[in-house]
Amino acid sequence: GQQLNQSPQSMFIQEGEDVSMNCTSSSIFNTWLWYKQDPGEGPVLLIALYKAGELTSNGRLTAQFGITRKDSFLNISASIPSDVGIYFCAGNNAGNMLTFGGGTRLMVKP
Amino acid sequence: DTGVSQDPRHKITKRGQNVTFRCDPISEHNRLYWYRQTLGQGPEFLTYFQNEAQLEKSRLLSDRFSAERPKGSFSTLEIQRTEQGDSAMYLCASSSLGFGDTQYFGPGTRLTVL
């Protein structure tokens, strides 16, 4: 089963608000990734983090690789309607299987 | 389009039938992965290939499942004697060893077993 605890499970926010979600693990990971998935589609990579403590931005998205290597967070600033979707964190060791969190469903009210 | 492609996008089959899915990775990616995703869950790892060698298989990959990557390019995932519990989205991803090994996913194949 999944080893990553992702929270919150869902969020319903007003357009323009900032969003924060996080992921924790009982195990250490060497890489943390954040994906967004729309209904009926595959996950799309948003941000990849390769080093403990790393803080990386991609437009309105910012993600950090926790210093303990057991957690990561994703922030979205000034949300817009197209941010709607399910966000997944994933951890990777040894370059093979990804372990995914349960997802955060984001809903944005215009 | 140079991303990961999967075919078919949707498959409806009757219980007991065999189905086969195809994945074409990003060109020159030497690693290819299969995942399964059920409704409301994150994807779960099934198996992965480095070039044509299948290097790891999850316990989720029962004897009815088989995957191949015969020439180190495209891959197929076959499910024999499908069961209703096989209904899920089957996702393929690829990565390039040595470039952060970041996995990029295809659009998935949605399987419905009646």
Image: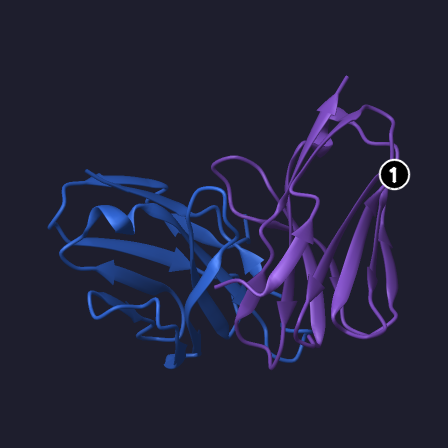
Chain colours: A purple, B blue
**Which is more toward the observer, B29 or A87?**
A87
Above or below — where is A40 with respect to A2?
A: above
Q: Which residue is mark 1?
A: A77
Residue at screen point 13% across, 56% down: B81
Above or below — where is B36 with respect to B113?
A: below
Apparent side of residue A43 relative to residue B47 in the rendered image (left or right): right
- Residue furthest left in the image: B16
Q: Position of residue B96 (x, y in %)?
A: 59, 73
* Quarter holding residue B54: bottom left
Residue at screen point 11% across, 50% down: B16
Above or below — where is B76 with respect to A51?
A: above
* Quarter holding residue B51: bottom left
Residue at screen point 43% across, 48% down: B108
Apparent side of residue A55 relative to residue B13 in the rendered image (left or right): right
**Which is more toward the observer, A47 or B50?**
A47
Q: Position of residue A35 (x, y in %)?
A: 65, 51
Assign the C terminus of chain A to one quadrant of the image: top right
